[in-house]
Image (cartoon, rainbow, N blue to C red):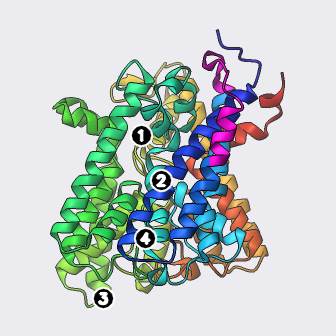
Amino acid sequence: MPDLTKIHYRIIIKVMGVFLMIIAIMMWLGLIFSYVYNEPDKQALILSGVITFISGFVLFTFNKKVDYELINKRDGFVIVSLTWVVISLFGTLPFLLSGTIDNFTDAFFETMSGFTTTGSSVITDVEVVSKGILYWRSMTQWIGGMGIIVLSLAIMPILGIGGMQLFIAEMPGPTKDKLHPRITETAKRLWGIYVMLTFIQFLLLMAGGMNIFESVCHSFTTMASGGFSTRNDSVVSFSPYIQYVITIFMLLTGISFVLHYYTLQFRLKKVWESEELKTYLAIIGGATLFIMVLLLLTTSNKPEAAFRDALFQTVSIVTTTGFMSSDYMFWQPFLWFFILMLMFTGGCAGSTAGGIKIVRHLILFKNSRLELRRLIHPNAIIPVKLNGKAIPESAIYNVLAFFIIYILIFVFSSLFMTIIGLDFETAIGSVASSLGNVGPGLKNTGPALNYAFIPVSGKWLLAVLMLLGRLELFTVLALISKAFWRF
């Protein structure tokens, strides 16, 4: 039995080594485009990969004899939280060594934004950045979308021993559905679907006239719900066909990958029974209709353009992808507030989307409604049900605690951002966007702008919020509690 009272540092260090070697290989893949386009970033990518791989190899080799059966839940929390910090630190190397970003704070912000699939950027002109670096930038989001932990479990069966602790710590949402009794097989199925959808989108983008490089980058960042683009205006300059393709795949990435698996197995009844999916589609449909009507009333947009912009931006914000087909800061100010509200929704649990997640909103709403009924019938025992099944009280308490902590972090972080000089709209927009892993915020951090102007302290705070949002608060916050470190 795993020792639940001990943190196994040698196991943690060895796992860090595995992750770094994987990241190094991903860096080197960018050399394909560097050589094809004859870009000057070859040396930076090669050196970055060498430093990262050697560091990982040393950590792995010096801790060769460890017993993976000893890994426990506490180890899982440490590994997951530490992994995102460590890979972000090494992920800065291509940006720094190529001269794309000239300081560590900005490079770390960009990399953390990538791995957490937030999509906020400090690069003011991405179109002058070399192809290899842009590929790495997109790759950070693709890796982070399904999660480096799940990737490792999929390709390294040795980590499948005790690997459930890592899976539980990283996978988003208050519930975890396994597709297979063995966690390694679950990870393989998830990544299989992820790769398949990425490839299908790549082909459809190519069919619409997008070149190979941009098709690869946009497929990576769409499937990850990331939002990094190869163009300064995001996807504004692409054809309506391209925008609709990206919209469809953003919509798909906001749906639980477990439901994608059931769909491929033709278990459609199980898919349609999902209350979270129905609510997700209803929110997107209602918000799209609302925005479209207002755009038709307040702008000169034609019906098709108004529908496309409304649908695209709604899906982009709800799924926390952050692409832009139209700058919503030029819409009516009332719609700014509406966009801010959408930043607090999020996609489905088990998807690549960030945010609070639809299932938590459902549980909160159902519990609030039942509390009103209990006021009338105080002795009645009325369980909160989801998909026809009673939800354990522990899960309800977890959701309530999550909401309270989430809002408190949002409020105090917004206050800090105003203290360091940001105006109110920019402050709340940047915090809501970072905590929800959305990308674009409001006003000076709107979809057509970036985060380069934010003071250093603000960038570090937002980077922390990105990590908190990606790992859904508790995984990171557990590490700073006294109870976690008490033996």
- Say which residue label 4 marks: 34
Q: Earlier in the sequence, mark 4 or mark 2?
A: 2
Question: Height in image: 71 above or below 188?
Answer: above
Mark 2 residue element: helix
Q: Are marks 4 and 2 in contact (CB under 8 Å)?
A: no
Mark 3 residue element: loop
Front-lying residue, 170 or 314: 170
- Say which residue label 1 marks: 350
- Camera-near label (1 vs 2) is 2
Q: Are marks 1 and 2 in contact (CB under 8 Å)?
A: no
Mark 2: which amino acid? Met
Q: CA distance from mark 2 to mark 3?
A: 45 Å
Within-10-Å neighbours for mark 1: few <14, some 14–19, many 20+: many
Mark 1: which amino acid? Gly
Q: Image quadrant for the C terminus?
A: top right
- Camera-near label (4 vs 2) is 4
- Say which residue label 3 marks: 299
- The boundaries of the magenta stretch are 54-74
Q: Earlier in the sequence, mark 1 or mark 2?
A: 2
Mark 1 residue element: loop
User: Residue drawn at (25%, 82%), measured in percent from left and top?
Assistant: 296
Front-lying residue, 89 or 364: 89
Is 60 contained in the magenta span? yes
User: Residue drawn at (66%, 71%), measured in percent from left and top?
Assistant: 106
- Say which residue label 2 marks: 26
Q: Main secondary structure of the magenta part?
A: helix
